[in-house]
Image (cartoon, helix red, strand yellow):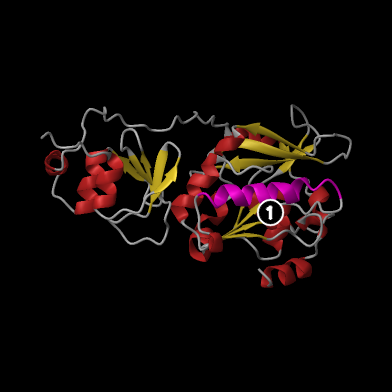
Amino acid sequence: MEKELNNIYQILTNIGYSLKDYGKEYRAKPIYRESDNDTVLRIYKDTGFWVDFKENISGNFPSLIRKSLNLTSEEEAKTWLKDKNYDYSIEQIEKKPAIKNTKIFDKSLLAKLNKNNEYWIDRGISQETLSAFQGGVAEAGKMKNRYVFPIFDLKSEIVGFSGRDITNKSKIKWKHIGEKSNWRYPLFINSDILEKEKEIFLIESIGDGLKLWDAGVKNFLITFGLEISITLLNYLLRMAPNKIYIAFNNDAEKNLAGNQAAVKAERKLLRYFDKQQIKIRLPNAKDFGEMSVQQIQNWITKC
């Protein structure tokens, strides 16, 4: 009698993986290294191509078997799979997600920003904090009459700009230039802090970030709106933080947009993280800009 062909699910569960079903992919804790994250390893159902978000490594299905069983080579893994009657009729194509090209802006543009920090200083932000974020007022162009922050990546390249209207005349409070979905901000100044703290606050805008920074709370990432991008999600998965606080604006007395978005963000994160890792922790005021340093420090002690 012909042996029944084994599939990816059967192979992985037989060698010790506990797989979670996420539609077109499985999520799992890697068995080839220490980990307490049950979703940090992605394995595509149709090809077996895998991604380890924490280690930032990936490969085809035989390479995962090689690592998982501590075999000497990929050829040995292929032989092992053949002995287990693995179905090789599925073409082993690497399914790497499409990555949009990120535009890099010339740093000479920074010289065109007027280092007039009056707008933020009037709102209680220190000169020291403003210097760290390297913003200034645009006096011409698409960002005219906005206080503009350059969006740096981890290589200190400028990948965009975020500008706050300082005239109170524009209906659009914040305007962005660049591929916002690719931003991981402000990792250029706090990546080491996040790695050390292992706790992250997700906040809506740079304005919130300035106030938190002044209050000594520097372990945050800015979502630039009410959605958690795939780029940020992948970073969180690689980092595997102990706690993620969703700290969007508190709109309880208005349209509830921030509150509802926080619940939506929580549901999204719970697909990838354990429940004890996620907590909604909205500011006590509408946003952090309306809170004093002392109020923020009192707020942080209750997180």
Q: Quadrant of the N terminus?
A: top left
- Looking at numbered disc 1 in the image, what kind of residue is underneath it? Gly
- Determine whether, in the image, residue 203 is placed left or right of residue 97: right
Going 35% across and 37% down the picture, which residue do you hit? 45
Q: Is residue 181 magenta?
A: no
Residue lying farthest right? 169
Going 86% across and 53% down the picture, which residue do you hit? 253
- Determine whether, in the image, residue 222 is placed left or right of residue 99: right
Q: How crowded is mark 1: few (under 14 residues within 10 Å), some or many (20 or more)?
A: many
Q: Where is residue 85 in the image (x, y as percent from the top left)?
A: 16, 38
Residue 96 vertical position relative to residue 261 in the rendered view, above or below: above
Magenta-colored segment: predominant secondary structure = helix
Residue lying farthest front? 1
**How many marks do you count on the picture?**
1
Q: Where is residue 144 in the image (x, y as percent from the top left)?
A: 78, 31
Image quadrant where residue 113 sits: top right
- Determine whether, in the image, residue 291 is placed left or right of residue 97: right
Residue 301: tell me if it is visible. yes
Image quadrant where residue 257 sits: top right
Q: What element carries label 1?
A: helix
Range covered by the magenta-colored residues: 254-271
Q: Quadrant of the C terminus?
A: bottom right
Q: Is residue 262 magenta?
A: yes
Q: Position of residue 55 (x, y in %)?
A: 36, 51
Q: Where is residue 261 in the image (x, y as percent from the top left)?
A: 70, 46
Q: Mark 1 points at which residue?
A: 209
Query: Which sits in the foreground, 136 or 287?
Result: 287
Residue 243: tell me if it is visible. no
Going 72% across and 53% down the picture, which residue do you hit? 208
Residue 250 vertical position relative to residue 142 in the rendered view, above or below: below
Query: Which sits in the foreground, 266 or 225?
Result: 266
